Structures are given as C-alpha cells and as structure tokens.
Image (spheres, rainbow, N blue to C red):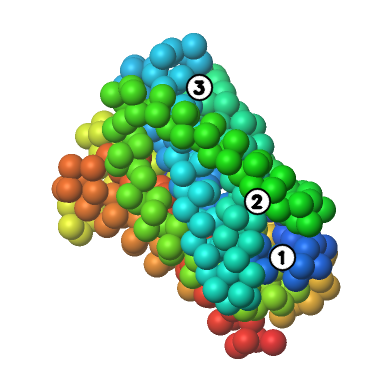
Amino acid sequence: MNRHLDVKLIKESLPALIMALIADSIAGYIMNLSINVFIAVPGLLMMIPALIDMRGNVYGAFISRLSSALHLGEVENLGDKRVKVEIGATKSLAYSAALIVGTIVGIYISFVTGNYFYAIFLPGIILITHLFTASILTPLTAYIGVKTFQKGWNPDNIGVPLISSVGDMVSVFFIILVAVLFLYISNMPLVVFFIVILSLIYVFLLIRRALGEKVGKKIYMQSMPILIVIALLELITGSMWESNKIAIILLVVPVVNETLGNVGSIFSSRLTSFIYLGFVEPKILPRGKHFTKEIFSLITLSVIVYSIISLLVIFLTWDFRAVAMVWLAAFLSIFILIIIAYYLTIGSLKAKLDPDNVVVPVITTLADIIGTAALIFSYFLIF
C-alpha cells in the first residue's frame, strides 16, 4: 500500500486540515449567527468570499514561495532579508486586493441602492478588516513556513491548511466586527471618510516600499494582475452567497470550500516543488509513479477529511440530506479542481511565470466558485 500512498503527505497534512475544518466550522457558525448584520449592510456578504480567499490568494502563495525558497536554500531563518521583503509584498498584495474588491462592490451597491455613501463605506470596511487580519496572518505565515521546515516537515503539506485554520475564522470575525463598528459611526460620514483616507495613505506607503525591492516588485507585479482577475471571479461566488442566504449552505460552505481549496493548493504547491526538483516532468498528459502516487494520496486524504466533515454536519444539523449534499458537492468538485491545478501549473511554467505566484491564488478562487455552485446544485437536487 505504501508504494501507492504518500503516508508522509497524509500524516503531515491531515492534522492541519482538521484544524482548518474546525476553524471553518466556527466561521460558518459565526456567519449563520450574523445574518442580521448581512441584512443591515448590503454587499457585505458579497465581499466575504474574496476576503476569506485571501488565505490562498495571498498567504497561500506566500507560503508556497517561501517553501520553494527553503527547499532551494535561499532562506534559512525568519531574520533573512528575503523573508522581510516577502512579508512587505504580501501585505501590499492583501491591501491592494481588498481595496479593489471593496471599491467594486461599493460602486455596485451604491448604484443598486441609490446611496452613494456605500462607495466609501464598503471599501472602508474591508480595508480596515485587512489592517487587522494582515497584521496577524502575514507574520504567522512566515513563522509557520520557516519553523515547520526547520523541524523537518514539508511546508507544502502543512502551510496552506494550517494558515487557513486561523485565516478564515479571523477574517470572518473581523469583517463582522468592523461592519458593526462602521454601522455605529455611519451617522458620522466625515469620521468614516477620515479613517478611510488614513488607511489609504498607509497602504500607499507600504506598496511603495515593497516595490522598492527587486524581489518584492517581482512578486507584486506578477501577482497583482492575477489578484485583479480573481477579485472579479470572487464576486461571482459572493453573488451566489448574496442570492442564496440559505442557512444550511452558509453553515457548510466555508468548510467545504476550504477543504477543496486546501487539497488543490497542496497539490499545486507539491507539484511545483516536484517539477523544480526534477521528480515530475511538465507533460501534457500526466504520467509516472510520482504523479499517480500523489493523486491517490490526495484522494485518500480528501475522503478522510470529508468523512470528518460529515460527522460535524450530522452533529450540527441531524439531517442526513445535508451529508449527502456535502458528498455530492465534493465528488463533483475535487476531480475537476485537481485537473485544473495540473494544467495551470504546467501552463504557467510554459508561460515563464512562477507557479507559486500564479496557481495557488487561482486554485483557491476556483475552489470557492466550483464548491459554492456544486453545493447550491446539490441542495436543490436533494432538498
């Protein structure tokens, strides 16, 4: 069995995936309890998929780059200049992506409601949220990547799901907290405007500093176009959330999409490292024992995690139809995502782009879109 199964992958990834599963169950529960906030702030639920997807788009890509640098001997400890540059570039990307999402949603909601205050209000909420989350998640991501490598573990197996285990929960908590605070001061538009302007100045200075470093500029310039496209794609997910405020879907969608994105990100990160190390050749038709073993191991890992999700769903809902909905959505999603991850990785290499900067953000975004669509389809098919 061990010839066909990467036990190390499962042993290292499973605890992190379980932690992410628990954290996302809490995030889903928080979302379910905060339905009145989502009703009070039009467009807030639309922004959440883009916000929580930052764990893959920005922090997942960060830990993937860091893992490659650690394997290649370019980084040895947290005090290295490369790590500091990566942290600055990662924060710059997070703030820039937040501003884009908030601006688009703010303009859209202003047009729909006729209240143009939302054009400042919604970007302010997501930008201030990122000032909190990025200050926590960016140094934590660096610490996890370096320390796990120093302990002899593979950051590709652990990093993305582990940072996700706190990322989604922290993101959902802070965006709801900041939304409540902004609602409290919404009758003082000058205060809101002043807070947003100060935040924009800080973000501008941080981006300027990141672009002053060669590595930071490369990361930002390669990643930002992808993040812009992703921001637009995440609005598809957000629109589906906004249009389907169904309790059972809001409860399970974070944990289902998180697991799907984690599996795809682990596959992409490991595949990139395998290609760099010469274990896998980027061919049009995948083949070879390393690739077959990887796929078999990821499917086994997914079955274990979705079995645990099923137990949580039964505990929370006592409805076996919800379990059937989760499994059908997983079955429809995971094989599609693995295929997409493979061809995106080899495609980025052929385009002379770093897969660590490009593939993980796209995969986590597609995981949200595919997972959400599959859950909605499964819900209406089963319920």
Residue designated by label 2: 125
Q: Which mark is residue 41?
A: 1
Residue situated in front as seen by the camera: 99 or 241: 99
Residue situated in front as seen by the camera: 231 or 355: 231
Kind of element beneath mark 1: loop
> How far across and down, in percent of the image, does residue 29 sit?
78, 59
Tell me what residue is drawn at x 54 percent, y 45 percent.
55
Kind of element beneath mark 3: helix
> How far across and down, in percent of the image, does residue 33 sit?
82, 63
Q: Is residue 171 left or right of residue 13?
A: right
Q: Based on the displayed image, in which of its 4 quarters is residue 93 positioned?
A: top left
Nearest to N terminus: mark 3 or mark 2: 2
Q: Please state, as top left, top right, bottom left or bottom right, where the C terminus lies in the image.
A: bottom right
Amino acid at pointer 1: Val
Contact (Cβ within 8 Å) of mark 3 with mark 2? no
Amino acid at pointer 3: Val
